[in-house]
Image (tube, rainbow, N blue to C red):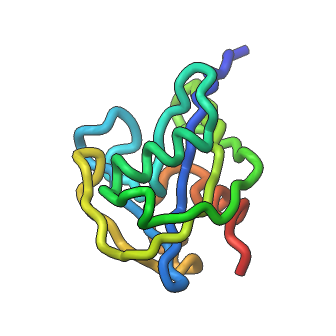
Amino acid sequence: MLTMRVNKVVTVFLEHEGTILILKRSQSVRTMKGKWAGISGYIEGEEEPFQRALKEIKEETGLAQKDFFFVRAGAPVKAEEQSSDILWLVHPFLFGSKSSQIRLDREHEDYRWIRPQELEEFDTVPSLKEALAAVWIA
């Protein structure tokens, strides 16, 4: 029987005027290159998921703390990576953004603001739709 390795991560959805931000992962990241995702990052050690979420928003979008605000957190979502022994435990968050202008870091090569129902049209990281469902209230 295979033992699954558990990686704890945050996935943050930024909402602006009814749209959500999705980011296309670049070739410089370790996993899931070219897939669309929310703002995401590994939870390190005993770090609180909320604190990691704040850090990732700033790093991956260039937004300052005054430019976004907390809306809600959802229950963790399990996501299995095909062809590996990794189980991702995704802590989803929804934040509002006062701006649609962001600055990408090296982790991403593109971004889009889309309506939540359009997410299924994109090649995404595993369980992104479920993570969104955990925080989005239509």
Q: Is residue 79 above or below residue 1?
A: below
Where's residue 67, x and y in %?
42, 66
Q: Please report the residue visible at 53 percent of the width from the left and 46 percent of the height from the top.
A: 53
Q: Residue 78 or 48: which is nearer the viewer? A: 48
Question: Would you identify the image quadrant in which residue 101 lies?
Answer: bottom left
Count of numbered circles on the image: 0
Q: Please report the residue visible at 53 percent of the width from the left and 25 percent of the height from the top.
A: 44
Q: Is residue 22 above or below residue 138?
A: above
Q: Please report the residue visible at 50 percent of the width from the left and 85 percent of the height from the top.
A: 17
Where's residue 8, x and y in %?
60, 32
Q: Residue furthest front?
A: 66
Question: Would you identify the image quadrant in which residue 110 lies?
Answer: bottom left
Q: Residue 45 or 51: which is nearer the viewer? A: 51
Q: Is residue 110 above or below residue 98?
A: above
Name the side, left or right, on which 2 lies relative to 75. Answer: left
Q: Residue furthest right?
A: 75
Question: Would you identify the image quadrant in which residue 71 lies?
Answer: bottom right
Where's residue 57, x and y in %?
43, 52
Name the side, left or right, on which 134 lies relative to 27. Answer: right
Q: Please report the residue visible at 23 percent of the width from the left and 46 percent of the height from the top.
A: 106
Q: Residue furthest bottom?
A: 17
Where's residue 48, x and y in %?
63, 34
Which quadrant holds the N terminus? top right
Q: Residue 12 or 95: which is nearer the viewer? A: 95
